[in-house]
Amino acid sequence: MIFALLALFMLSSLCYASDSRFIWQSREQFVALEHQDAEPAATVKPNDHPVDLSLERLVSMLGSITVRPSDSEKPDALFTPSALQLLAPHLQKGLSQASPGEDVTFAIIGLHDALYGLAKSQKVTTGRLFYKAGKLNLIVGLVQKDVNDREDRRLHPFTPGSRQYVSNGDWTLLTDKPLVRRDWVAFGDEWQPSVVPAAAVDKNPAHAQQTAPQPVQKQEVQRKPADRLVILNDLKQKGLITEDEYRAKRLEILNGI
C-alpha cells in the first residue's frame, strides 16, 4: 500500500513536469507555462494571452504584496528584492509567450530573516500567474515555506497555486485591494502603486540644524549592537544556536561597532 502511494505521488509529479514548458530553471527554481487548471464546478475560460506588461509595472505589482505569519504582527514582503529582480523578467517573458489556454507558474527561493534577524534562511514561494479581463491574477501555493534540500521533489514538489483548491498555510496575504480569495490577488489595469510623499526639504540651514538631532541618531546606532548581543546570548542560553555559531556571530557584531 505504501509503495503504491509513493508510486502515485511520483507519477503525479512526473505528469506535472511533462505538462510544463519551462521558460527558466535554476536548480529547484523555475518559471514555466502549463495548461490552465479547472475552476470548481465550472469550465475555465481562456486567458487573455499573450500579454505584454512592462517589467516596471510587473515588479511594482508583485512587490506591493506583503504577508503576515500567524505567529507575528509584523508583515513582510512576499518576495525579497533580489528574488523579485531574478523572477520578474522570466514572468514577463512567460506572459508574452503564453497561449490563452496556458498559465505561468513559478517557484522562487529567497533569503528571509530568521532567529530575530541574526540569520537568514531559504524559503520558497510558488504561484500561478495569468491575465484575464483586464486583470493580472496571482494565486499563491507555497508561501515562504522553509526549504529542505534533503527532500525528494518528486514526493515534495514545489506546486503552484490552483483555481480549484485554496492554499493552506499559517499566513495572511495583505494588499491595498480586496483579495479574490485568501490565496488569490488580482491587479486591475487601473491599479497604481502607492506613493509615499517625500519629506519636505527645508532650505533654511538654521532650521535644518534645529531639526537634525544628531546625538539621538548616534545613540540609536550605538544601542543596536548591544540589543543584538543580548538576543544572541538569549539564543545561546536556550540552546537554539551552537557555541561556534555564537562566537562567530558575536565577533561579527563586535566588528561592526
Image (cartoon, helix red, strand yellow):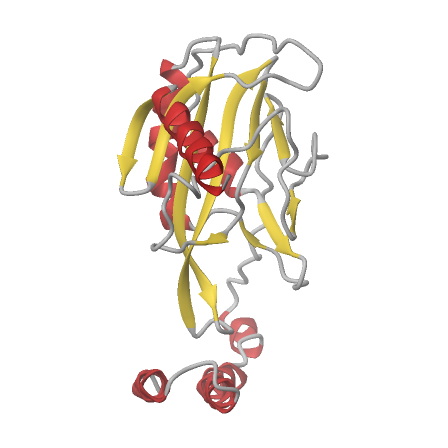
Percent position of residue 198, x then y: 55, 52
Which residue is at a point 50% across and 51% down the rendered structure image?
Answer: 144
Question: Does residue 116 appear left or right of residue 10 in this picture?
Answer: right
Query: Quarter holding the C terminus?
Result: bottom left
Q: Residue furthest front?
A: 1
Q: Is residue 232 visible?
A: yes
Percent position of residue 75, x then y: 61, 56
- Taking depth in this image into account, of 207 and 232 the one nearest to the observer is 232
Percent position of residue 9, x then y: 45, 35
Which residue is at a point 68% across and 63% down the rendered structure image?
Answer: 73
- Total numbered labels placed on residues in the image: 0
Q: Is residue 196 visible?
A: no
Is residue 242 placed above or below 127 in the rendered structure?
Answer: below
- Snapshot quadrant of residue 195: top right
Is residue 204 placed above or below 31 in the rendered structure?
Answer: below
Percent position of residue 127, x then y: 50, 34
Which residue is at a point 63% across and 32% down the rendered structure image?
Answer: 184
- Snapshot quadrant of residue 252: bottom left
Is residue 78 placed above or below 35 in the rendered structure?
Answer: below
Question: Does residue 53 appear left or right of residue 256 in this picture?
Answer: right
